Amino acid sequence: MSSGYQLFKLGVLAFVPLAKDAIHVYIGFLCLLASLIILRRKLSSFTCLILGLLVACTMELFDLRDGFPWQESVKDIVNTNLIPFVLVLLAR
């Protein structure tokens, strides 16, 4: 049985012509941009990574609750946060 969260994800995937893993990359980048704007920090600040990490972990908690394997959750957290992390490292 699918939860409301899983149905929401399926709806987004039907609307946005991207693979599930690609959406995580976009979410991570959008979280980085939102952090830069909201927190008014420089790109070199590790503080800018907190929002992406929180969003990714929250999404994966719902997936774990709905019975998805934890290995998939780890992969999704990495997909969401890897590019922002590399950008912050390069900015330092």
Image (cartoon, grey):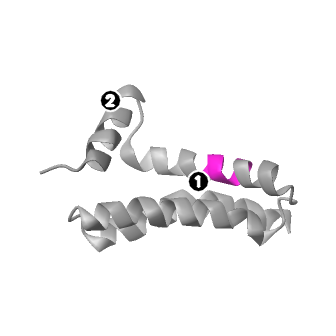
In the picture, residue 83 is in which quadrant? bottom right
Region in magenta: 29-33
Up the image or down, 73 lies above or below 25; here it is: below
* Structural crowding at the residue carrying mark 2, measured as other residues with C-alpha within 10 Å and reported as few (<14), some (14–19) or many (≥20): few
Disc 2: which residue? 14
Q: Quadrant of the C terminus?
A: bottom right
What percent of the width, then of the height, locates residue 16?
42, 30
What percent of the width, then of the height, locates residue 51?
64, 61
Q: Answer left or right for 23 relative to 91.
A: left
Badge 2 marks a residue whose secondary structure is helix
Lower sequence index among marks 1 and 2? 2
Residue drawn at the location 74% of the way across and 63% of the way down? 48
Q: Nearer the viewer, residue 84 or 60?
A: 60
Badge 1 marks a residue whose secondary structure is helix
Name, please, the residue furthest toward the front: 4
Q: Nearer the viewer, residue 2 or 71?
A: 2
Residue drawn at the location 33% of the way across and 40% of the way down? 8
Residue type at mark 2? Answer: Ala
Q: Answer left or right for 83 relative to 7.
A: right
What is the distance, in whole Å, between disc 1 and disc 2 at their CAs? 20 Å
In the picture, residue 43 is in which quadrant? bottom right
Residue drawn at the location 49% of the way across and 59% of the way down? 79
Residue drawn at the location 28% of the way across and 48% of the way down? 6
Our reading of the magenta stretch's main secondary structure is helix
Residue 30 is a magenta residue: yes
What percent of the width, then of the height, locates residue 32?
69, 54
What percent of the width, then of the height, locates residue 53?
57, 66
Disc 1: which residue? 28
